[in-house]
Amino acid sequence: MTPSAERPLLVTGTTGLVGGAVVLELLRRTDADVYCLARDGRDEPAARRVPRLLAGMAGAYGMDDVLDAIRTRCRVLPGDITRPGCGIPEELLPATVDEVWHAAASLKYRERDRAEIDLHNVTGTRNVADLAVRLGARAFDLVSSAYVAGTRTGRMPEEPVPVGCRANNAYESSKMAAEALVSGVPVETVRVLRPGIVIGHSTTLAAPTTAGLYGLVDELAAFRARIEPRLGNYLDHYPLAFLGDPVGTRGSLVCVDTVAAAAVRLSRVGAPGGTYHLTNTEPAYLGRTIEGVLAALGMAAPRWVSDRAELSSIDDALSKRLEFQAPYMLQDKVFDSARTRRYCGEELFTVPLSTERIAEFVTRYVRDRAGEQVEAGRRTVPSV
Ligand SMILES: NC(=O)c1ccc[n+]([C@@H]2O[C@H](COP(=O)([O-])OP(=O)(O)OC[C@H]3O[C@@H](n4cnc5c(N)ncnc54)[C@H](OP(=O)(O)O)[C@@H]3O)[C@@H](O)[C@H]2O)c1
C-alpha cells in the first residue's frame, strides 16, 4: 500500500450512527487515512470492533465500494473521550492530523444522568479538542444538534445559541455547553454541525441506531407489548391520543447519508468556521411523523388533543412514557439552513417525508430489529 499524500483525518464516535457514516463518506471522497477513535467493546477490542461495524454499515447503505478502504485506510485508535488525552496509548497517536470530526457523545437525556452526560459531552468534547490542537489539526468539526434550539420556537438561525436559552433536558444543555466550549478552540476553522433528528439511509432506509425517531418507535412497540396481555390487539383499533399539534408542530428528520455528505462536503469546499444546520428543507410535520410510525407498527391512526384532560387513562400512561418526546410535540421549530445549502448545494437537503415514506423507514427498522433479536437468540443456543 502506498501512503496517502493527504494528511490523515480523525473521527470520533465511529461505531455510532453519525460518526460511522462520516468515516465511510471520507473513505469515498478523500484519499486520506482515517483515524477512528473508539472504545473497546465488552468482548471485542476496538481494533476488531470498528472494521466489523463499519463494514456492516457499508453493507446496509449499499456502499460496498468502500469495503477495501475500511481495511486499508482506517486506523483504529482505542480510547475513551472522557479520559485525558482521550486515553489513547501514546505510541498509537499519529504525528499529525488535518481535520477532526467529533461525533462521539452520550445520547442520554435524563436529569439523573446529568453528570455522566456532561462528562461525555462537555469534558469529552474538551478532551477531543485538546487532542485536535495537540495533533496540529487545521479544522475541528463538532457534531452538535439542531435541538440546541432548546425551548425556543419558530425559525432557528444558523447562529450560536443565545445567552439565556433554556434547554428541554440535560442532553440539550450539554450540547449547548459543548458548542460554547469549541468556539474558543485554537485551530484555523471550527465548524459546529447541527443535524436534525437523524433517520436511516435515504435509499436503503437502513438505520443502525435506536435513537431519535427509533426511540419513539421502541417506546410505542413496548407500550403495545405491555398492554397486550390484558387488552389483546386493542391498539390496532383504538386511536391513541397525543398532546400536540399535528400540522402546527414541525421538526427536522434528516437522513444519515445526508448528514455525512454535508459534514464532508463542508470540509472539501473549505466552508468557513461557524454554525451549520444539517436539516431537511422539508419540515417534518408531527402529524405525518406519528401517523407514519403508528401505521408501520400496525396501530390505529392517532387522535390529537390540546389539553391533558382529554387523555384517557391509556393515553395518559403512554404520554408518561414519552417524557423525552413530549416537549418536541408542542414546540414548533423550523431550522434555517441557507448557509449550509450555499456550500453543500440545494438538492442534498430536499428529501420529501410523507407519512408513507416515514412508515417505510420505520418498517425497515422494525424488520432489522426483529432480525437482530433472532440472531441474538441463535447465538445463545449452545452449539452441540
Ligand atoms: N441520532 C440523532 O438523531 C442525532 C441528532 C442530532 C445530533 N446528533 C449528534 O450526533 C452525534 C452522534 O450521534 P449518534 O446518533 O451517532 O449516536 P450513537 O449512534 O449513539 O453513537 C455515539 C458514539 O459515541 C461513542 N462514544 C460514546 N461515549 C464514548 C466515550 N466515552 N469514548 C469514546 N466514544 C464514545 C459511541 O461508542 P460506543 O459504540 O462504544 O458506545 C458511539 O460510537 C452526537 O453528538 C449526537 O449528539 C444525533
Image: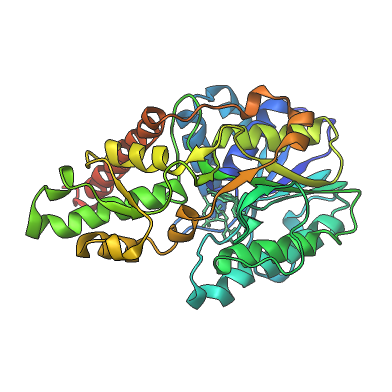
In the rendered image, is residue 76 in sight? no
- The location of residue 173, given as percent across then percent down, is 63, 67
Quarter of the image where one finds residue 9: top right
What is the x, y in percent for residue 329?
45, 53
Q: Which of 342 and 181 is in front in this view?
A: 342
Tell me where residue 145 appears, x and y as whole percent: 63, 52
Which residue is nearer to you in this view: 265 or 376?
A: 265
Most foreground residue, 81 or 275: 275
Question: Exactly how many numbered labels are in the figure?
Answer: 0
The answer to whether any part of residue 63 appears in the image is yes
User: Ligand 1 appears in which quadrant?
Assistant: bottom right
**With respect to residue 353, does 297 lie above or below?**
below
Seen in the picture, residue 238 relative to 113 is either above or below; the reply is: above
Q: Quadrant of the N terminus?
A: top right
Report the residue at 52% width, 44% height from top: 250
Instruction: Reply above or below: 272 against 118.
Output: above
**Left or right of 266 in this view: 257:** left
Residue 221 % position (x, y): 26, 50
Q: Residue at x 30, y 65 (%)?
A: 309
Give the side of residue 371 with respect to residue 284, left or right.
left
Q: Which color scheme did the rendering employ for the protein?
A: rainbow
Classify residue 231 as left or right of residue 153. Answer: left
